[in-house]
Image (cartoon, grey):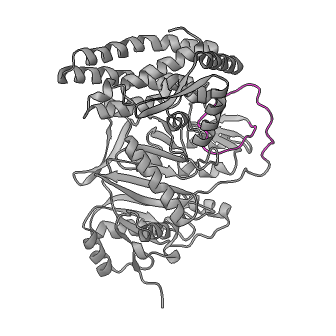
Amino acid sequence: MGPVPIIALDEADATCGGKALGLGLLSRSGFNVPNGFVVVGDLDALALGAVVDRLDAPMAVRSSGLLEDSATASFAGQLQTVLGVVGSAEAAAAILACGRSGTADRVRAYAARAGAATPPRVPVVVQRLVAAEVAGVVVTQDPRTGLDDVVIEAAWGLGGSVVDGQVVPDRFTVSALGAVEGSVGSKATRLDWRDGELIRSAVPPRERRRAALTDAQIREIARTAREAHGALGCPLDIEWAISGDTLWLLQGRPITTASSPPGSPAARPASIVLVSGVGCSPGRVNGVARVVHGLDEFTRVRPGDVLVCRTTDPAWTPLFSVVSAFVTEKRATMAHTSSPDLLTLHALRLKGFAETVVLADRFGLDAGATQEVLQDYAAKGWVTSSSFGDLSGWSLTEAGRRVNEDQLAHELDGVGSREELAHVHDAFLPYNATVTAACSAAQLSPSSVTYERVREQLTDVTPALMALEADLTARLTRFAGYHRRFNVALFRADDDPRWLTATELDSCHRVWFELHEDLIATLGITR
């Protein structure tokens, strides 16, 4: 007896292909997975019509090859996906196209490199299309470092904008200790299901500059991803979407890591940096930097080259077995990471008075190790602990302040970026005047009209803040996070104007003041 042609998604097993199996496991583990079914054999028109009617919604139709989304080969983007399918007739056509996509040349080439066969037809997953306000991807292990940090990418609308490289998304990293840092991408366009069709539209400038996720949503995605990792027993690459108050998991595949191609040259110490980009996996190689602008230039690529391009899609996959590495972004990441000893004192310099857990969280340090460092510094007279009513915490002594200034000066000279940071500080000053004036107006003339004007002024500053932070973190990684925190505060200020200037909150004013203090402390400037 052959397999049942249509299987409910929450009952999917290995015969339904890798994508369906992963979704079935997530659904049975209690995660929010959109309703759907899997077609594993010849179509039965009556049966298909019945299950489509039960979904009663636009659909997402995707292939689910038997080796797809497996631990050894993801086939990511190689097989067919059709979004916005309506009715049984469109569903039948989409299922046929996805089921036969395994015969495409690029899929055969990918399978051959993975040592796998390509059957003439693959199972197909059909799900209710989630009309997402924001969507993206999350991985439960940072592929750049191998650490158990959760990395989230997000953009407005459906997740295809992120997955297909149509936009530069927001990117957030949540450490194992819960520290969050990230950057806001341009998110220039968005894809939505609206008025019965898929529509790509421009994102308004203000929304481009705003983080697509709140702090609570970032933490919910990270927590859910880690729980999914635990449920499936391996690091995962998950596609997700948020609609209303619900976080949906759309796909969940094991993370695959490709080895270096045979004959890759051994790494040698770098001399002159020709180009740099955002790291997506660990490793180091040498090779000719080959800038490729499109498919028509593939013939220029030679074995062992370092491929440099704006972005990639599945059509670029054949090059990955030829090149020794590839770079797909322009932002520099070869920056200096400060020592925990410096970061502990510096966090106290920035916070003024704080508990151990707050100081550790500021730079993602271990709270236990931070407590030991603080106790050692207290014995040296660099910090002191005190209590005020229900409050207790640490503060920096004058001797500790001098030690921190010496640490910062030694670090900056060692990195060799004093001149570059001085230029950043010069560029910062005009914006500092604007932010200071705006926040003063909010404090001195509190009213709905003033708050709206201040929000607009601060929103206009956010692109400059993002650019300043990029320049700073290209030299010193500890400057990361200001732009995200500022955006989060600005977002919350729409509902609660205290987030503009309140000192007890991580408000726009407090974040900006901390950045100013960070800059002048690093450069040794007296306020």
Q: Residue drawn 35% across and 31% down? A: 489
The location of residue 165, given as percent across then percent down, is: 48, 44
Is 210 on the left-hand or right-hand side of 79?
left
**Residue 447 at x, y percent in the picture:** 18, 21
Residue at the far bottom: name it: 1
Between residue 402 and residue 99, name the one nearer to us.
402
Closer to the camera in the image, 352 or 5:
352
Q: Quadrant of residue 429?
A: top left
Is 279 covered by the magenta stretch?
A: yes
On the question of residue 389 being in view, the answer is yes
Q: Residue 263's x, y, as percent? A: 80, 48
Residue 273, placed above or below residue 162 = above
| Residue pictured at 33% horizontal, 59% vertical | 129
Q: Residue at x 46, y 53 (%)?
A: 223
Left or right: 397 as drawn, with respect to 438: right
Q: Is residue 446 magenta?
A: no
Along the line of sight, which residue is nearer the eye, 524 or 213? 524
Examine the image and state in which quarter residue 292 appears: top right
Considering only vertical position in the picture, is 271 above or below 42? above
Query: Magenta part mainly helix, strand or loop?
Result: loop
Q: Which residues are magenta?
A: 264-287
Q: Position of residue 332 (x, y in %)?
A: 60, 29
Q: Foreground residue, 360 or 462?
A: 360
